[in-house]
Image (spheres, rainbow, N blue to C red):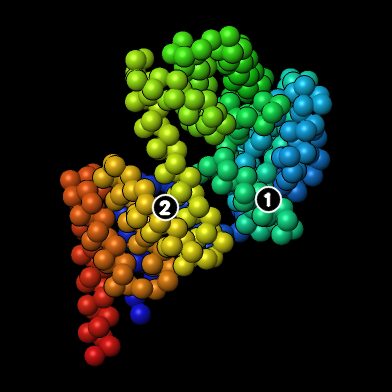
Amino acid sequence: MVNHRNLIKTIMLGLSMQCALTLSQTLYAQEAPASPNAATQQAGAKDHGPWQIDADLKDVFAQAKRENKDVVVKFTGSDWCPPCIALDKSILSQKEFQDAVTDDFILVKLDYPRQKSQSPEVKQRNAEAQQKYRIEGYPTLILFDQNGTPYGQTGYQPISPEKYAQHLYQLRESRLLRDRILDEAEKLQGTARAEKLDEAINVIGIDNAALGMRDQIKEISELDANNEAGLKEKYASILQNMKWEEAMQRVMMAAKSGDLDEALIQLQVVFNDDPPAEADKVQEMYMLKAQLLVAKGDNEAVIKAVEDAIEAAPNSQMAPQLRAALDNMKKSLDKNVSTTN
């Protein structure tokens, strides 16, 4: 048999799709033990201070509403992720940081460890949060308002605890400005309201708005039905992209749960019912299909999926590397057949 781990490394050459990278790591990465330094740091970090560990976000948001606070959620890998550990050690565990933010923020960590045990309930809940908020790397910190609507994202930065606290407050200021603009939008109708909603979204950025302001994005497209302000066209494509990303997240969740057949079915649904217009995205879908088929050991189907990926976007930046990967896979299969005979 062809070595699937080597095969997936070949496929990964030039692969740009982040969710495919995440899937590959999930399916094939060896669970490397934490380094001695990381273990030492974790052993000395049992006092989590104001941080709630693996809390149910529903309860957290209810608390935030009662206390009129925003929420910071850190998505982390506590026993394997060096920048996660560094961020905890140098900033998030420091009194200077905690004293500066706890009046206005509830602090939560959702952990995705490789060795530390977690209950099935916590694992499932954290996995759902990872999918919902499209976490693709660690550490990721997402800021929420008291209603549980995301408005900002950040990660590791080599700055002082005080500077990091200031950074969070700067993001919070963008949320406060967004809310003021949304209040103004409530007094408007038609295209004027669409433009004001667009202004609010621009304050926090489309990536954050895509997580928590989907209704407003849809409303903008409807209010500017004739594209008088150019917003219907702008947000129609954004809505289409959001729909595609959500469909791909369903594929990822099925794969991560180990149900590769369901993942392939969900992927085929996207191909059949709502394929993206962009050739590069179609190419990425075929590459994800190839990875799922690698996990199933269907080498001939893997080659077909890579061929389809090349055909979907033959002039893409990825295409030359895919052709090289395809040649290597075919040679590997031919060599295996010759050896068998």
Q: Residues within 10 Å of mark 1 (few under 14, many from 20)?
A: some
Q: Secondary structure at mark 2?
A: helix
Where does the image place residue 115, in percent across and percent down from the top left?
Answer: 66, 59
Residue that mark 1 sits on: 125
* Residue type, numbered disc 2: Ala
Q: Is residue 114 found left or right of 47 in the rendered image?
A: left
- Residue at 75% over, 49% down: 43
Q: Secondary structure at mark 1?
A: helix
Cα–Cα span, label 2 and label 1: 22 Å
Q: Is residue 77 found left or right of 201 in the rendered image?
A: right
Q: Residues within 10 Å of mark 2 (few under 14, many from 20)?
A: many
- Residue at 31% over, 70% down: 301
Image quarter in which the N terminus is found? bottom left
Where does the image place residue 85, in percent across and percent down from the top left?
Answer: 63, 42
Image quarter in which the C terminus is found? bottom left
Quadrant of the rendered image containing residue 237: top left
Q: Is residue 106 found left or right of 254 in the rendered image?
A: right
- Residue at 63% over, 22% down: 168
Against 60, residue 321 (above or below) is below
> Is residue 285 in sight in this rendering?
yes
Quick one: 280 or 317, which is closer to the camera? 280
Where does the image place residue 190, in percent across and percent down from the top left?
Answer: 47, 14
Residue that mark 2 sits on: 20
Are discs 2 and 1 less than 8 Å apart at CB? Answer: no
As drawn, which residue projects farthest toward the bottom?
341
The label nearer to you, 2 versus 1, is: 1
> Is residue 166 in sight in this rendering?
no
- Residue at 40% over, 38% down: 241
